[in-house]
Amino acid sequence: MTQTVTIRPLEPADKPHWAPLWKAYLEFYETAVAQEVYDTTFDRLCSPDHPDQNGLLALVDGTPAGIVHYIYHPHNWRIEKVCYLQDLYADPSVRGTGVGRKLIEAVYAEADAAGRPAVYWMTQDFNTTARQLYDRIGVLTPFIKYNRS
């Protein structure tokens, strides 16, 4: 039986579906954010006042099953902004069905349409399931990320 996957921009009415998906994503990375951050992030993802912050929702047979957030920002090595795919999550029940790939490809299409063809993202080295997809749809770079101490 073939499932229908629809990818569309987040809408304000999606918050009750988006919040548990983002919470599960954050839990996977063993972190959490304050309610104010949840609220502010969702509002920005849906607001025309924040055109560089965007979110997409994956629906599988009409049921919310995945999210992706992406951010456009300036880059010193390019004239145009680049696209940072910041958060990608597919519910475990739909993993391996192409939802993650479709979300990434939707970000690629949005970035291309916006004139921002450079798309990048990061993941934890232990995220082996997702990395199997990333190795097929992207190019692993040698960069190592550091945070302010």
Image (cartoon, rainbow, N blue to C red):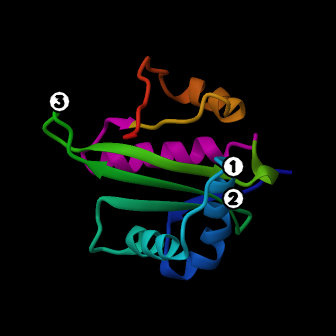
Q: Is residue 15 above or below residue 67?
A: below
The answer to whether residue 118 is magenta is yes
Residue drawn 75% across and 45% down? 95
Picture quarter containing residue 76?
Answer: top left
Identity, as a three-letter code, of the amino acid under mark 3: Trp
Q: Which residue is mark 3?
A: 77
Identity, as a three-letter code, of the amino acid under mark 1: Phe
Task: Say whether marks 2 and 1 touch (CB < 8 Å).
Answer: yes
Pick out the residue farthest to the front.
149
Q: Residue 61: x and y, percent?
A: 74, 64
Q: Is residue 50 left or right of residue 2?
A: left
Residue drawn 42% across and 42% down? 108
Task: Say whether marks 1 and 3 touch (CB < 8 Å).
Answer: no
Structural distance between the alpha carbons of marks 2 and 1: 6 Å
Q: Which mark is residue 79?
A: none
Badge 1: how crowded within 10 Å, few (<14), some, or many (20+)? few
Q: Which residue is mark 1?
A: 28
The answer to whether residue 109 is magenta is yes
